[in-house]
């Protein structure tokens, strides 16, 4: 079982259940933005990130991944150089985020420690499958029509804008298809950021139009909704629902921070049992993880067991080698104890017990100067062991979009191997072999860092490997109605 983190709105960070209260007590309280020396803050936090990852992350001592240790050093120098010119919160974020993103590890996360005011120019753009950047939202700038192609801003063409303002911060270059997904952030900024597009040219219906962008404040909630629209993401809720003859088992997150989210997931699992006969005879069932960026993988396991039975799931999971090395440090041990408390509160007593015992073992190993604590967990069944007949007699689909990462991928590891399940939708995201996160406030008080505690040694997916669906989504908004119509029309 693992706990991962999900990346949230624009420049913010959604801290998962494993992120604990191990924040450095000496960290300064975040000052008002106008009073911050952003260059000094960036330098201070870059050094802290370097030292934290060096001492507590499994990557720097991982002989199988020398690139991690190289970037730890080389990226630090590049980031410090960028930090010298920081005069605004946006500069600070780019300097630090450029460093953390360079590890190509989706579980090294950085974000502001407190909400920052955001801005947008009334429209959002995104790259399409042909590599053209087009207007996909224009709520406050109707003068630029939807579908208009962005040609250039301030003398830079759209491709150059993507390379300068998006790729270094939003794109893991090991996952090529995510480049377009990150492009929706081009027309977003921290409020008052002087380094943002100003005068842009667009083409629509064969005509070119030039606009001086009007950047205005936007609430985090509204910007989040706008970005979801720009990305074509539906905002589903945890639960079981029916659209015509198609049943959706909706799991938009395993990142359950509020009590009502935990109860919604428990209610879903109960309802799967109560409606077992209905689902068994349903013509179409969709395991819907659109928008799911991770969380606690234990929830996905429970959903799978409720639908397919514990024996089938166990035979799938039992074919995986779960051997891991935990980085030995006292800080990581304290993080595990904090995570154990969260698991206990959520009723996951076995997970809580495991983490507390592991914390004791890691503490002893760190005191003895060891860098890892190995926990062997070889496969219990040979590859290809039959999982039994599916209790669901209709067609069953696993529906993913580009968001699926971390614990969502753990669920996909299982679901794709259950009897009769067909993977449809869009290619998933991917994650590194480093996982199980903790976090802390950075010394400037302006940012937070999250990092992984362990490394998989024989995971079923390789480092940054994504899943391709058997049948790709044909395009357009992925609404419930559109998905229901599409899957019910797929050939057997």
Image (tube, rainbow, N blue to C red):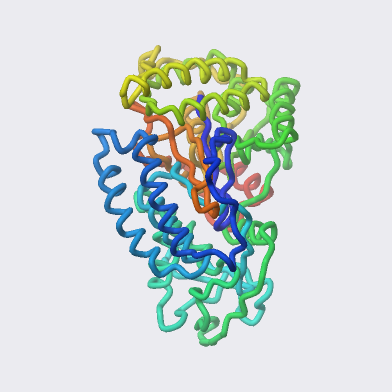
Q: Quadrant of residue 228?
A: bottom right
Depth check, front residue: 365 or 398:
365
**What residue lies at 49% left-to-right and 45% top-to-bottom?**
449
Residue 473: where, in percent of width, then height? 52, 50
Residue 272: where, in percent of width, then height? 70, 25
Q: Quadrant of residue 255?
A: top right
Along the horizontal axis of the image, is 418 left or right of 48?
A: right
Residue most extreme to the front? 26
Q: For the image shown, how many numbered marks are present on the structure? A: 0
**What residue lies at 54% left-to-right and 24% top-to-bottom?**
337
**What residue lies at 58% left-to-right and 68% top-to-bottom?**
124
Depth check, front residue: 229 or 296:
296
Is residue 397 visible from the viewing direction of this image?
A: no
Residue 175: where, in percent of width, then height? 38, 49
Is residue 141 visible from the viewing direction of this image?
A: yes
**What residue lies at 72% left-to-right and 42% top-to-bottom?**
243
Residue 383: where, in percent of width, then height? 36, 19
Above or below for 361 versus 81: above
Above or below for 43 versus 161: above
Along the horizontal axis of the image, is 89 left or right of 370?
A: right
Along the horizontal axis of the image, is 64 left or right of 333?
A: left
Above or below for 28 versus 394: below
Depth check, front residue: 110 or 361:
361
């Amino acid at each position: 079982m693992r706990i991962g983190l999900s990346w949230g709105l624009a420049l913010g960070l959604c801290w998962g259940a494993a992120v604990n209260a191990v924040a450095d007590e000496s960290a300064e309280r975040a000052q008002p933005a106008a009073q911050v020396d952003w260059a000094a803050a960036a330098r201070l936090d870059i050094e802290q990130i370097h030292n934290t990852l060096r001492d507590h992350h499994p990557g720097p001592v991982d002989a199988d991944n020398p690139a991690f240790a190289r970037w730890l050093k080389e990226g630090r120098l590049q980031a410090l150089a960028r930090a010298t010119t920081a005069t605004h919160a946006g500069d600070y974020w780019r300097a630090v985020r450029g460093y953390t993103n360079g590890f190509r590890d989706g579980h090294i996360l950085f974000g502001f420690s407190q909400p920052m005011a955001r801005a947008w120019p009334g429209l959002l753009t995104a790259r399409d499958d042909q590599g053209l950047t087009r207007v996909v939202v224009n709520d406050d700038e109707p003068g630029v029509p939807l579908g208009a192609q962005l040609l250039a801003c301030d003398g830079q063409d759209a491709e150059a804008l993507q390379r300068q303002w998006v790729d270094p911060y939003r794109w893991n270059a090991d996952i090529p298809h995510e480049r377009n997904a990150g492009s929706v952030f081009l027309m977003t900024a921290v409020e008052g950021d002087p380094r943002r597009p100003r005068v842009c040219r667009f083409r629509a219906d064969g005509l070119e139009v030039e606009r001086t962008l009007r950047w205005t404040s936007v609430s985090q909630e509204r910007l989040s909704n706008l970005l979801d629209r720009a990305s074509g993401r539906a905002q589903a809720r945890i639960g079981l629902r029916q659209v015509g003859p198609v049943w959706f088992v909706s799991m938009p997150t395993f990142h359950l921070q509020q009590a009502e989210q935990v109860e919604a997931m428990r209610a879903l699992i109960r309802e799967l049992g109560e409606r077992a006969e209905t689902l068994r005879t349903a013509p179409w069932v969709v395991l819907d993880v659109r928008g799911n960026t991770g969380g606690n993988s234990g929830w996905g396991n429970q959903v799978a067991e409720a639908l397919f039975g514990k024996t089938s799931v166990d035979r799938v999971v039992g074919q995986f080698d779960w051997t891991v090395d935990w980085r030995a440090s006292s800080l990581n041990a304290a993080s595990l104890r904090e995570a154990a408390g969260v698991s206990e509160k959520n009723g996951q007593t076995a997970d809580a017990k495991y983490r507390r015992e592991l914390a004791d073992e890691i503490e002893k190993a760190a005191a003895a100067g060891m860098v890892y604590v190995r926990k062997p967990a070889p496969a219990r069944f040979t590859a290809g062991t039959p999982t039994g007949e599916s209790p669901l007699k209709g067609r069953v689909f696993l529906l993913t979009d580009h968001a699926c990462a971390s614990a969502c991928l753990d669920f996909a590891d299982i679901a794709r191997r259950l009897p009769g399940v067909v993977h449809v939708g869009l290619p998933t995201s991917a994650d590194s072999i480093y996982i199980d996160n903790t976090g802390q406030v950075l010394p400037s008080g302006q940012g937070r860092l999250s990092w992984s505690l362990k490394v998989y040694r024989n995971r079923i997916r390789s480092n940054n490997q994504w899943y391709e669906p058997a049948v790709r989504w044909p395009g357009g908004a992925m609404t419930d109605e559109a998905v229901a119509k599409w899957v019910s029309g797929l050939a057997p």
